[in-house]
């Protein structure tokens, strides 16, 4: 299974949704980095379940414990291990699908690939695994801070309700409401829609937009390891993600090159671009402008309604929605998107230090 990500700053996550614990091993974190445990815990709290009425009501404090790689508050250069215990498992909520396949879940594909699956909340395929990514992403953010890099994500769309563009928003207000949209009026409409969907025992999708600023010029590798390609891979590895676009994205297909080209100019000795349709990346390498991208999330597959399906023997069955699930995943996905972006940028930052004398 693909449990590891990164070349130099490399993570390996482990654990299942309803097992004793989940966690992550971080290899390649430079020695001497100050490890702010309160910051890591705060990042996990942004992702944890049960934080509002529009998220799953599973109650996990997601209290993390560092087992190795830190001494007297600083990284030592050896593998850094973080464990998060699962405290609110209700495996009985999933006994009814032990032999059946839930629509649009990984039940059938895991069964077909491995011949065995942990049906308790999806086991390894559960979004519970992303808590480990957020813990690792917090370490990556601490590293990026040393270089002035800042990463902020927010909910830019729920259903057909869209927020203004990121450059028209105050991203310091992302945490001001439970849907994590920095535009208050749009946030109220989003929350109302999620409430409506939740009461109808259904789910809805949305979009998370992420912006990285002060990214050094030169991050990314030619050909196969382009920066935008790795960002896309990282985002598409997140549960429920169905699409990724950066810069002008699909809207750029409607434009002419004479408009879309980002003209260079000298800004007091610094080379910049007058526009940023490239999304801060040209030739797969960062150019110093803000990197921005959108991540599309599908409606959560588990709905509190009866659905037609089949069991292992191929017999028709009715699958009933049970358990505790998000009516819309995007509010809790914001810190996950930030974390995956941080892991990509931290890895490329370390790789860039070997690109020239």
Image (tube, grey):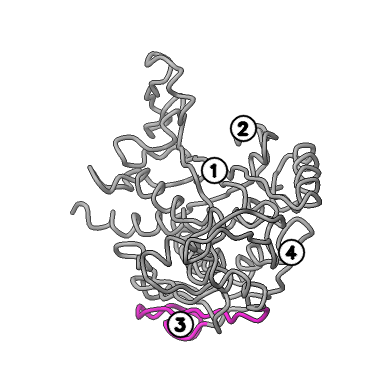
- State if disc 1 and disc 3 touch (CB < 8 Å): no
Instruction: Name the secondary structure under disc 3.
Output: strand
Dot in front, 4 or 3? 4
Instruction: Read off the residue under disc 4.
Output: 51
Q: Which label was assigned to residue 296?
A: 1
Place of residue 28 in the rendered image (x, y in percent of width and height, measured from the top left): 33, 71
The reply, left or right, for residue 351 in relation to residue 145 is left
Spatial separation of the CA atoms under disc 4 and disc 3: 29 Å
Q: Residues within 10 Å of mark 3 (few under 14, many from 20)?
A: many
Dot 4 crowding, Cα within 10 Å, few <14, some 14–19, many 20+ = some
Residue drawn at x 79%, y 59% is 53
Give whichever of discs 3 and 2 has the lower sequence position: 3
Q: Nearer the viewer, residue 130 or 127?
A: 127
Lower position in the chain sequence, tag 1 or tag 2: 2
Labels 2 and 4: the sequence-earlier one: 4
Reading the image, the residue beneath label 2 is 165
Q: Quadrant of the C terminus?
A: bottom left
Q: Are marks 1 and 2 in contact (CB under 8 Å)?
A: no
State which region is magenta.
Answer: 66-89
The x and y percentages for residue 137 are 49, 63
Reply above or below: 117 against 315: below
Please rate how many residues cluster around mark 2, counting C-alpha atoms within 10 Å: few if below 14, some from 14 to 19, many from 20: few
Q: Quadrant of residue 95?
A: bottom right
Q: Which residue is mark 3?
A: 70
């Amino acid at each position: 299974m693909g449990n590891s990500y990164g070349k130099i700053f490399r993570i390996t996550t482990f654990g299942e949704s309803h097992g004793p614990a989940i966690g992550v091993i971080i290899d390649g974190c430079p020695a001497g980095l100050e490890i702010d445990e309160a910051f890591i815990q705060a990042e996990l709290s942004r992702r944890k379940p049960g934080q509002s009425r529009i998220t799953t009501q599973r109650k996990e404090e997601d209290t993390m414990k560092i087992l190795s790689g830190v001494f007297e508050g600083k990284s030592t250069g050896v593998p850094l291990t973080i464990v998060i215990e699962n405290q609110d498992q209700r495996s009985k909520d999933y006994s009814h699908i032990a032999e059946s396949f839930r629509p649009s879940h990984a039940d059938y594909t895991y069964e077909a690939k491995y011949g065995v699956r942990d049906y308790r909340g999806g086991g390894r395929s559960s979004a519970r695994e992303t808590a480990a990514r957020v813990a690792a992403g917090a370490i990556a953010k601490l590293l990026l801070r040393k270089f002035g890099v800042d990463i902020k994500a927010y909910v830019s769309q729920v259903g057909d309700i869209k927020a203004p563009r990121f450059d028209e928003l105050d991203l310091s207000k992302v945490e001001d409401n439970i849907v994590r949209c920095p535009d208050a009026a749009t946030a109220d409409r989003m929350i109302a829609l999620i409430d409506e969907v939740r009461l109808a025992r259904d789910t809805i999708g949305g979009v998370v937009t992420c912006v990285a600023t002060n990214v050094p010029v030169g991050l990314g590798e030619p050909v196969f390891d382009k920066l935008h390609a790795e960002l896309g891979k990282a985002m598409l590895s997140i549960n429920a993600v169905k699409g990724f676009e950066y810069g002008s994205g699909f809207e750029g297909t409607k434009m002419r090159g004479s408009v879309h080209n980002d003209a260079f100019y000298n800004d007091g000795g610094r080379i910049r671009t007058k526009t940023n349709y490239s999304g801060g990346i040209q030739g797969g390498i960062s150019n110093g402008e803000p990197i921005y991208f959108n991540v599309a999330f599908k409606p959560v597959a588990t709905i509190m309604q009866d659905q037609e399906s089949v069991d292992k023997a191929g017999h028709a069955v009715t699958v009933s929605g049970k358990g505790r699930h998000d009516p819309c995943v995007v509010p809790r996905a914001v810190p996950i998107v930030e974390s995956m972006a941080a892991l990509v940028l931290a890895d490329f930052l370390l790789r860039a230090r070997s690109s020239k004398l």
